[in-house]
Image: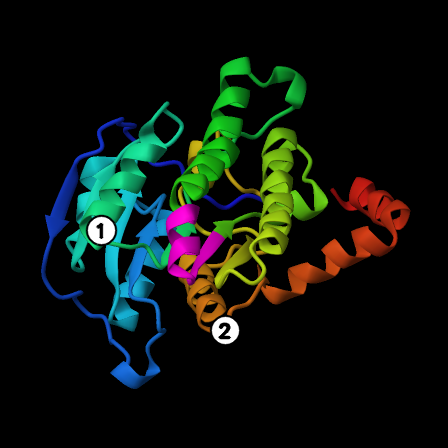
Amino acid sequence: MSHAPTPAGPSNRARPVTKSGPAAGLDARPADQRTPHSTALVTGASSGIGAAVARRLAADGGWRLVLNGRDLTRLEQVAAEMSATTVAADLSWPGAGRRVTEAALNHLGRVDLVVAGAGVGWAGDFTGMPRARIDELVGTDLLATLHLVRGLLPHMVAAGSGRIVLLGSVAGSVGVRGEAVYSAVKAAVAAFADALRYELRGTGVGVTHVVPGVVDTPFFDRRGAPYRRSWPRPVPPERVADAVLSAVRRGTDEVYVPGWLRLPARVRGAAPGLYRRLAAHFG
């Protein structure tokens, strides 16, 4: 059960391109209903969940945005819908996270919200998984997130406010057949979210772990195998984006999308033997 899209046409360029103009067709909220945050960096914003989050923040109004993705063309297409700056860079490349962080801070002055949505996937038996793809998943889905947060966190702690949103997956909560490495890295993201949240207590900086199930994005086409299960049905990325904004407003630590996905995670925690038997039978 995967979700995060792999941007097409990788690029290691980190070139800010300011796009100005109103977000077409977006209904901004009145000023008194907006979140108190005002600046945000969204990674993985060239398509899928990241793009949906960028559009949702633009619709909310009052946000100054920096968008990151690997595909400059797609990224600029998303940014053209709103007033945003783009930083095209593959975060798995050495030093890319630092360049994105510096570009965001230079343009925004501060970063109140980080949405770490960049990610890749791979489907198939672990024994047949190429070594390069293992490194790619770990580098993009885990290490890039750690380095990005590490670069921005001191500035947020010094400011005494902010929120970090980490995009996980239900695969990291329960494990999914055919996605062993993806499940492993998303489980690591979940553990990182919990540990970091404890560490940041009292600093004014919060951590939200968003746990989607199956999301209707290009992710499945790009991971090497389409989604073929009849259940659970994919949800639109806009639903995840709504959950992100709601969690930011409320300061929620963890949110599942859809909410019922919390149940199998709880069953696995309370009765792991029963869960494993059910998972082995139903797949």
Q: Residue at x 42, y 57 (%)?
A: 237
The local crowd at label 2, few if under 14, some if 14 to 19, many if 20 or more residues have their Cα within 10 Å, is few
Q: Using the image, determine if residue 219 lies above or below residue 200.
A: above
Left or right, 155 with respect to 182, comes to left
Residue lying at 22% horizontally and 51% vertically, measured from the top left: 78
Cα distance between the residues tagged 2 and 1: 27 Å
Residue 108 vs residue 261, the one in the foreground:
108
Residue 34's x, y, as percent? 32, 77
**Residue that numbered label 1 is attached to:** 78
| Quarter location, residue 118 | top left
Q: Which residues are magenta?
A: 153-165
Q: Amino acid at mark 1?
A: Val
Residue 39 at x, y percent in the picture? 29, 60
Queried whether the magenta region covers residue 159, the answer comes back as: yes
Q: In what element is the residue under mark 1? A: helix
Viewer-closest of 96 and 268: 96
Q: Name the spot of residue 130 as percent of width and height, x first.
A: 54, 15
Quick one: quadrant of the N terminus? Answer: top right
Q: Which mark is residue 250?
A: 2
Residue type at the position of mark 2: Arg
- Residue 194 image label: none
